[in-house]
Amino acid sequence: MAQFQPNQPNGQHKCEHCGAIYDVRWHQAPMRDHDSANCGCCGKAMANWNATRYPTFDLVGECPDDKDVKFL
């Protein structure tokens, strides 16, 4: 699972399990948020965090290997 740091810039992330590509955007919360994100293609954990700044993931294109988007 990727280790995301709250000071990382917006960018792209590749699921290390299936290769799906995501746009990553960072948001600021007024309170600490403890959560995680799972891949929409394979359902595996991509990231977790416990901070006031957190990432959101938007799938770019389609799932690799003709997988259906099952988990979004």
Image (spheres, helix red, strand yellow):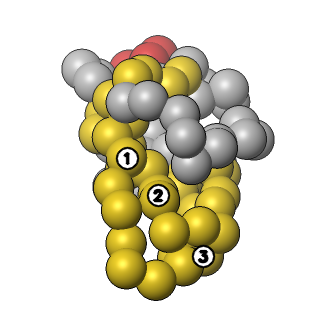
Q: Position of residue 37 (x, y in %)?
A: 53, 56
Q: Is mark 1 on a helix, strand or loop?
A: strand
The residue that disc 1 covers is 26
- CB under 8 Å between callouts 2 and 1? yes
Q: In this view, does 62 lie above or below 8?
A: above
Q: How far separated are the C-alphas under marks 1 and 3?
A: 14 Å
Picture disc at residue 54: 2
Q: Is residue 33 above or below residue 20?
A: below
Residue farthest toward the bottom in the current orientation of the protein:
31
Left-right relation of 31 to 70: right
Label 3 environment density (alpha carbons within 10 Å; few <14, some 14–19, many ≥20)? few
Type of the residue with mark 1: Trp
Which quarter of the rendered picture does the N terminus lie within? top right
In which quarter of the view is residue 18 placed?
top right
Q: In this view, does 30 lie above or below 16?
A: below
Q: Residue at x 64, y 61 (%)?
A: 49
